[in-house]
Image (spheres, rainbow, N blue to C red):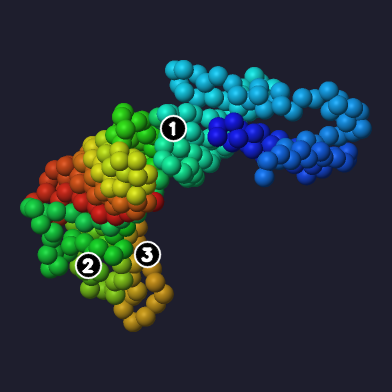
């Protein structure tokens, strides 16, 4: 059975390789000789010119088939039937056979044909081979989430001037990441990125301004406010330990993923923005003030991720306060928290 498969594969690969040359734009036409045997056996030989036909007179087809029956590697149990050598000396294997008792597998490209002769009848199944997973890789991803902060273990109530409105308080992060596989389904991810914090306030009558000793929220009764927020940007380094149960159980991307780890960032900028229209009518106007002097220059905390398939959710929690000690709008410390998606 094995020899029959090898003979068919030999003919198929020969025909495929020569067929590639036929369609690659060559000017010389190719003729073919077809040798048929048994009920469906066939060997196709392609030649470029008449001189090659003369060489066929001394060609022993039986010898070709016999020489395909090479000895298996006793250690790996594999047999390479066809190889393609590149100019740089590298070798690409085209056809490979592996024998295990009554089961013989033939691999051609990314397709694997398994012939099982253990029963009264021969069974054949076809599998698509999976690409080997690299032990180390780099990639880019993006975070998109919403920000808030915890005050004494809860979110500030709406009557506070610094209470945050979820929609519009965007957190955007651009990250360059690297992943090192530690074992099957277990990874160490680390990276560097830039995060933009936005805290959009619910009460648009209040504007965040820079006071003498701290940040102040003043009520603007002289204008009609439309938007009031504070923003900050941080250069952030992070590291995560990740468990991929899909990879662990050979299910690819379809399994559950869990990751957690610390991060630390350095502030690049910070300001407040107030958008309003004057009473009595006017176009929209914007006030942008430097309130970053009261924001903490260093942020650090914990990040967690949970994913299923290609969808991954993340959350971050800053262990430090958003504002420097004693410089914030509340007697309680405000710790930023974020929820979002990883793209």
Looking at the picture, does residue 203 appear above or below residue 133?
A: below
**Any mark on residue 286, and which?**
3
Of residues 6 and 167, the one nearer the viewer is: 6
Q: Residues within 10 Å of mark 2 (few under 14, many from 20)?
A: many
Among the two numbered marks 1 and 3 on one chain, the one whose residue lies closer to the N terminus: 1
Q: CA distance from mark 1 to mark 3?
A: 79 Å
Contact, mark 1 vs mark 3 (Cβ under 8 Å): no
Q: Residues within 10 Å of mark 1 (few under 14, many from 20)?
A: few
Contact, mark 2 vs mark 3 (Cβ under 8 Å): no
Q: Please name which of the two marks, 2 or 1, marks the residue nearer to the observer.
A: 1
Residue 35's spot in the image, x, y percent?
76, 38
Among the two numbered marks 2 and 3 on one chain, the one whose residue lies closer to the N terminus: 2
Residue 153's spot in the image, x, y percent?
8, 53
Relative to 10, 265 lies left or right = left
As helix, strand or loop, the secondary structure at mark 2 comes to loop
Of residues 207 and 99, the one nearer the viewer is: 99
Q: CA distance from mark 2 to mark 3?
A: 17 Å
**Any mark on residue 102, and which?**
1
Q: Residue at x 45, y 21 (%)?
A: 76
Q: Which residue is mark 2?
A: 202
Q: Quadrant of the N terminus?
A: top right
């Amino acid at each position: 059975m094995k020899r029959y498969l090898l003979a068919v594969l030999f003919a198929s690969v020969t025909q495929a390789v020569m067929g590639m040359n036929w369609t690659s734009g060559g000017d010389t036409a190719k003729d073919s000789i077809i040798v048929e045997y048994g009920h469906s056996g066939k060997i196709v030989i392609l030649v470029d010119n008449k001189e090659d036909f003369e060489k066929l007179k001394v060609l022993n087809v039986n010898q070709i088939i016999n020489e395909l029956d090479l000895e298996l590697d006793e250690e790996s149990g594999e047999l390479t039937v066809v190889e393609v050598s590149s100019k740089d000396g590298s070798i690409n294997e085209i056809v490979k056979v592996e024998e295990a008792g009554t089961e013989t597998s033939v691999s051609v490209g990314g397709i694997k044909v398994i012939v099982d002769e253990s029963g009264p009848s021969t069974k054949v199944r076809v599998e698509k081979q999976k690409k080997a997973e690299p032990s180390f890789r780099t990639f880019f991803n993006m975070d998109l989430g919403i920000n808030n902060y915890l005050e004494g273990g809860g979110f500030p109530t709406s009557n506070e001037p610094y209470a945050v409105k979820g929609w519009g308080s965007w957190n955007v992060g651009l990250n360059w990441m690297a992943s090192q596989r530690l074992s099957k389904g277990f990874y160490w991810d680390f990276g560097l990125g830039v995060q933009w914090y936005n805290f959009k306030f619910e009460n648009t009558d209040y504007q965040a301004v820079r006071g003498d000793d701290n940040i102040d929220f003043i009520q603007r009764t002289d204008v009609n406010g439309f938007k009031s927020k504070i923003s900050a940007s941080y250069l952030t380094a992070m590291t995560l330990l990740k468990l991929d149960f899909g990879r662990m159980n050979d299910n690819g991307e379809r399994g559950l993923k869990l990751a957690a780890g610390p991060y630390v960032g350095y502030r690049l900028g910070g300001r407040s923005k107030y958008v309003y229209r004057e009473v009595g009518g006017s176009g929209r106007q914007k006030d942008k003030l430097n309130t970053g002097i009261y924001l903490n220059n260093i942020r650090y905390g914990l990040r967690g991720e949970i994913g299923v398939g290609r969808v991954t959710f993340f959350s971050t929690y800053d262990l430090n306060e958003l504002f420097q000690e004693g410089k914030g709008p509340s007697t309680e410390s405000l710790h930023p928290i974020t929820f979002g998606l990883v793209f």
